[in-house]
Image (spheres, grey):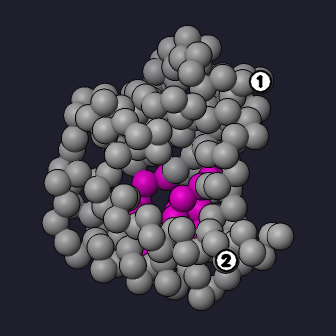
Amino acid sequence: MSADGTGDDEVLIGGREPREIVLAEHDPRWAGRYEVERRRIVAALGDRVLRIDHIGSTAVPGLAAKPVIDIDISVADPDDETAYVPDLERAGYVLRVREPGHRMLRTPELDVHVHVCASGSDWERRHLVFRDRLRAHPGDRQRYEDVKRSLAARAWDDTNDYADAKTDVIAEIMRRAGSALG
């Protein structure tokens, strides 16, 4: 179920995808891959990209991750797909998720996910706070990795089910991040 209460089948373009979850040790080359994709996105969208960030586990040194580069781009209105989706598609990305305030496009090779949200949105803030918390707090980073490894050992009907199963540990870490902020 997505954050807005709609079912996954309503927001996933192309339907559910069963795939094995494989975690890799952190690879310093992931930062370089992010840079390549960042330049590709900026070349496609120019100043319509208000912010661009490497997010997700591949953005956290020392954290095992699925070898998928997650990128967050902030735009004026993510629901106005005509303002950016056609250009990202011409750059080689494919629209996969459509939900209010958030889109996700990915490479055909499934190794890069481009999340599109509004500048200053809760989506943007949560992902940056979580990434930064894991970068700065080895205990939280290890806790998250332990849960990911445990979950990756199970069979999943869809990768989104694996992501949903991490909700409790993410909420636990975000509570600590929130108390540290305020």
Quick one: quadrant of the C terminus? bottom right
**Is residue 122 magenta-colored?**
no
- Figure disc tally: 2
In the displayed structure, 42 sits above or below 59; it is above
The one nearer the camera, 73 or 101, is 101
Q: Which residues are magenta?
A: 53-69
Left or right placement of residue 128 versus residue 164 in this view: right
**Is residue 61 magenta-colored?**
yes
Q: Residue at x 67, y 33 (%)?
A: 118
The one nearer the camera, 17 or 170, is 170
Task: State the separation of the CA atoms marked 2 and 1.
Answer: 35 Å
Type of amino acid under label 2: Arg
Determine whether the residue tagged by mark 2 lies in a helix, strand or loop.
Answer: helix
Image spot of residue 124 (x, y percent): 66, 46
Residue sitting at the far front: 5
In the displayed structure, 157 sits above or below 10; it is below
The one nearer the camera, 3 or 163, is 3
Q: Earlier in the sequence, mark 2 or mark 1?
A: 1
Type of amino acid under label 1: Asp
Residue hosting label 2: 176
Image spot of residue 29 (x, y percent): 54, 62
In the displayed structure, 179 sits above or below 89; it is below
Which one is in front in this view, the residue at disc 2 or the one at disc 1?
2
Determine whether the residue tagged by mark 1 lies in a helix, strand or loop.
Answer: helix
Residue 177 seen by the camera: yes
Residue hosting label 1: 47
Q: Residue at x 30, y 80 (%)?
A: 150
